[in-house]
Each structure stands twice: as structure tokens, then as C-alpha cells.
Image (cartoon, rainbow, N blue to C red):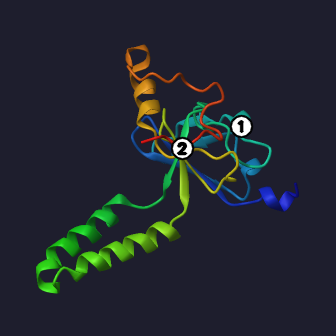
Amino acid sequence: MSASSIERDVELAIECDCGSRARTRAIAPSALPPAVRCAACGAQRALSAERLAANGGLEGCLACGHRELFTRKSFPRALGVSIVVAAALLAPWTHYLSLVVAAAIDAVLYRCTKDVVVCYVCGAEHRGFAPDPRHPRFDREIAERLRFGPRAVMGKPMRELGTANAPEPDH
């Protein structure tokens, strides 16, 4: 593996206890600082560097160290909802072609938008890290087990190595 394969701009966004988002960027995963400082309150949060894979991927959350992560598109939901609402409001006057245009815009944005890896536990967002190991999309069963613990009624046990290279959920 060459050094250029793991040199990529990365970003980590962490929810601070004060309610703001603490962010850090680096030119490579290995260049991330040992801690992230919140600009609003000045609090520092140490990063779990041991969750960084040798190839620059994620074996777990860098903020809290938890192994359960999921992948989603990094797209502002408010913009998506605005496009749909605008298309729906214009539908009667456009003979409903605005809905077709909104669907086309949605498809293009989906293809062009990059992925973000999110921690189930703390909600930290990891951008720009290597895609291997791959983390599946959001799985309600994992979220419920982490939220309710032993009271959760879902049947599958947690994976020992977390979601790294786990299969996509069935639903």
C-alpha cells in the first residue's frame, strides 16, 4: 500500500456537551490531532486513534471508540424536503411534471453526494476516510439494541468486531 493511497482530506464532527459541533480537519487520517477542541466552550475530547485502520479506514468511532457505525449520504435533509415541497406546490400548474423534475434532481444529487460514516452511539460524523472496511447503511435493530440494551427485543446478537465489513441490513 502506497502512502498516497491513505493521504486524503478527512473531517471529523463531534457533538459537544454544550450542544455545538466540534470539528477538525486533516490532510490525512494519520495527521488528525490527538484531541478535538470545541470552539464554543473550549472543552477538549480525546480521539480514539486505535480505531483508525492501517489503510486510513475506520474500525470504530474516533470520538467515542464504539465499533458500531453506519453509512449515509452527506446531504442536508432540509434541502431535500424543500425540493419535494416546492415540486408538490407547483404540481397542479405544471401538470405534475415538477414531481418528475424533483425526482430527477433527487437522483442526480444522490449519485453526486459523498458518504459520511456516523457513530450509532455519539453521532460523530467521519468524512473522507478510506472506504475499507465498509460500514452498512443504518440498521434499526442495532440502534434499538444500543438504545435499550438488555430490554431490546431484537434477536440478533451484536457483532464482536462491530459493523466493519458487515452485510447490509435485510430491511
Instruction: Give the alpha-carbon distance from disc 1 to disc 2, as whole Å.
Output: 26 Å
Q: Position of residue 156 (x, y in %)?
A: 50, 24
Is 86 on the left or on the right of 35, as rendered?
Answer: left
Residue at left 68%, top 60%?
9
Q: Name the image quarter holding the N terminus.
A: bottom right
Contact? badges 1 and 2 (CB < 8 Å): no
Q: Position of residue 107 (x, y in %)?
A: 42, 71
In the structure shown, which secondary structural element does the residue marked by tag 2 occupy? loop
Which mark is first along the chain, 2 or 1? 1
Q: Quadrant of residue 82?
A: bottom left
Three-letter code, disc 2: Glu
Q: Position of residue 101 (x, y in %)?
A: 31, 80
**For mark 1, does the 10 Å Cα neighbourhood hold few (<14), some (14 to 19), or many (20 or more) residues?**
some
Please, which residue is most extreme toward the bottom here? 94
Residue at left 49%, top 40%?
169
Q: Quadrant of residue 5?
A: bottom right
In the structure shown, which secondary structural element does the residue marked by tag 1 occupy? helix
Please, which residue is most extreme toward the right here? 2
Please, which residue is most extreme toward the top here? 150
Is 132 on the left or on the right of 80, as rendered?
Answer: right
Is 83 on the left or on the right of 157, as rendered?
Answer: left
Is 5 on the left or on the right of 82, as rendered?
Answer: right
Residue at left 33%, top 65%?
80
Q: Position of residue 142 (x, y in %)?
A: 47, 31
Three-letter code, disc 1: Ala
The residue that disc 1 covers is 49
The residue that disc 2 covers is 168
